[in-house]
Image (tube, grey):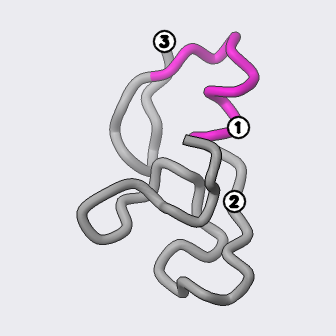
Amino acid sequence: MTTCETCGGEYKATDPRAVERHTAPVDCGGTCRRCQGKPWCYPCGNSFCHCDGGH
């Protein structure tokens, strides 16, 4: 398991989807400045970043 530097949660480094969700920046299209450029697991308000749409 790998510990995410953004959210502190653990994820499997062998799971490509998990790696992407904890490392790849999301593109919010400029609608949410808090999440822009952060991975999906970045806390945005009271939930994870909603810009990704894939959760």
Q: Check the image and report above or below for 3 versus 25.
A: above
Give the residue number, with chain letter if any, for mark 2: 25
- Which residue is label 1 attached to? 20
Q: Position of residue 9 (x, y in %)?
A: 36, 32
Residue drawn at (68%, 15%), measured in percent from left and top? 15
Check disc 2: other Cα within 10 Å, few if <14, some if 14-19, many if 20+.
Answer: some
Quadrant containing the C terminus is top right
Which of the two labelled residues, at mark 1 and mark 2, occupies the earlier sequence position? 1
User: Residue 18 appears at what percent x and percent y?
Assistant: 62, 27
Q: In the displayed structure, would residue 53 be above or below residue 23?
A: below
For the point 70% across and 10% down, the residue is 14
Tell me where the magenta segment starts and ends, as one range.
11-22
Spatial CA span between label 1 and label 3:
15 Å
**Does residue 38 sit above or below 22 in this rendering?**
below
- C-alpha distance separating marks 1 and 2: 8 Å
Q: How busy is the neighbourhood of tag 1: few (under 14 within 10 Å), some, or many (20 plus)?
A: some
Helix, strand or loop for disc 3: loop
Number of the label disc, if any, that sits on residue 1 = 3
Residue 18 lies in the magenta stretch: yes
Seen at 61% across and 87% down, the residue is 31
The mark tally for this picture is 3
Which element is circle 1 on?
helix
